[in-house]
Amino acid sequence: MNPSETIISVRDLRLSFGPKIIQQNVSFDLKRGSIFAVMGGSGCGKSTLLKSMIGLLRPTAGQILVGQEDYWAQNDKRRTDINHRFGVLFQSAALWSSMTVGENVALPLEMFTTLPPHVIRRLVELKLGFVGMEQAIDLMPSEISGGMRKRAGLARAIALDPDILFFDEPSAGLDPITSARLDNLILTLRDGLGATIVIVSHELPSLFAIADDGIFLDAVTHKPIAHGAPRDLRDHCTIPEVMAFMNRQADISPTDETKG
Ligand SMILES: Nc1ncnc2c1ncn2[C@@H]1O[C@H](COP(=O)(O)OP(=O)(O)OP(=O)(O)O)[C@@H](O)[C@H]1O
C-alpha cells in the first residue's frame, strides 16, 4: 500500500440543483488509507458532495477522477463497475426491515456475484464477524439496537470488499460510547482492510479522533474555505467560520435588534 497514492481526485467540481449552486471550486485529493472528513454547517452541501462521488448526482462542472478515470465521463456500465469499489453507509443504515441481518448483508453478494449460497453464507458470517455481529445473523433489524444496525450496515457496506468507503453521518443518533465504538471500528476497517474512507459527520469528537484529512465547505460563499485534518483546523485555523464550527459556537454576530 502506497499511502501517498491519490485514489480519487476531485477537480474544480460544481454541484447545483437547477439554477441553485450548492458548492463550486471543490478540489481535493483523497489519499489511499486516509480518513477524509467533509465538514461544514447544515445545508452547505456535504451530502450532495458525497452523492456526486458515489454516482447519485452528476456534477454540473469539474471532474472526479477515480484512479486515472474520469468517473462522470464513463458510460453507465463502466460507472457501475467502478461503483463496486465503493461501500456506502447512509445515516439510517437503511437495512431492509423484512429481511434478516444476514440476508441484508448477503444482498450485494447475491446481486453482483455468482457465488453459490453456501459461499455467500460463509462470507456473510465473516463480514458480520468483522463488526462483532455474528450472533445477530438471523435476527430482524427491528430486534437489534441502533448501534447494531449501524454495524450491520457496515458489514453490508464491506460485503464486496470495497477499497473506498463512504459514510454519511455514521454516528447520528448513537450514544457517546456506541459512537466511540463505531469510531474504533472505522479505524479497524482502515487499518485491517486497507480501506480509504470519506466521512460526513457533525460529530466533532469522532472527527478529531479518526480523520487525518478533510475539507470545510462554506454555506455562504458556496466554496470550500479550508482543507486539512479536523484536529489541525481546530488547533490552527484562523478563519472565523471554521473556528466557530470547530468550537461549536453559535453565530454571535449582533442581530439587527441588538445592533447599536
Ligand atoms: N434534491 C434536491 N433538490 C434541490 N435542492 C436540494 C436537493 N437536495 C439537497 N438540496 C439542497 O442542497 C443544499 C445542500 O444539501 P445537503 O444535504 O448536501 O447539505 P448538508 O451539508 O449535507 O446538510 P446537513 O448537514 O444538514 O445534512 C441544501 O440547501 C438542500 O436544501
Image (cartoon, helix red, strand yellow):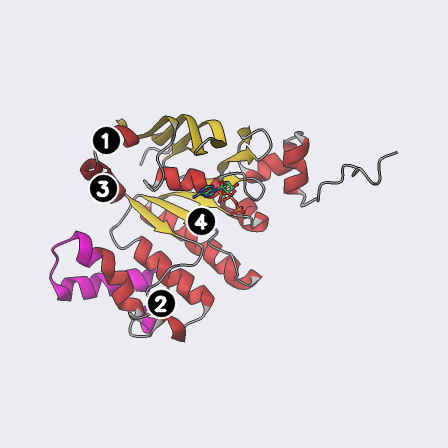
Q: CA distance from mark 1 to mark 2?
A: 37 Å
Q: Position of residue 160 (x, y in %)?
A: 24, 51
The dominant secondary structure in magenta is helix
Reading the image, the residue beneath label 3 is 80
Label 1 or label 4, whichever lies nearer to me, is 1
Q: CA distance from mark 3 to mark 4?
A: 20 Å
Image point (51%, 63%), residue name: 178
> Is residue 14 among the parts visible in the rendering?
yes
Reading the image, the residue beneath label 4 is 168
Q: Quadrant of the C terminus?
A: top right
The mark nearer the N terminus, 4 or 2, is 2
Q: Position of residue 135 (x, y in %)?
A: 33, 73
Q: Which residues are magenta?
A: 109-136
Q: Mark 2 near mark 3, Cβ–Cβ under 8 Å?
A: no
Reading the image, the residue beneath label 2 is 133
Reading the image, the residue beneath label 1 is 74
Image point (38%, 37%), residue name: 52
Q: Position of residue 185 (x, y in %)?
A: 42, 56
Left or right: where does residue 235 sit relative to residue 147? right
- Judge whether residue 112 is colored magenta: yes
Image point (43%, 38%), residue name: 49
Queried on whether the Cβ of the residue with tag 4 lies below 8 angstroms from ligand 1, the answer reads yes
Report the front residue among 155 and 258.
258
**At label 4, which amino acid type do we have?**
Asp
Compared with 161, 143 (above or below) is: below
Label 1 or label 2, whichever lies nearer to me, is 1
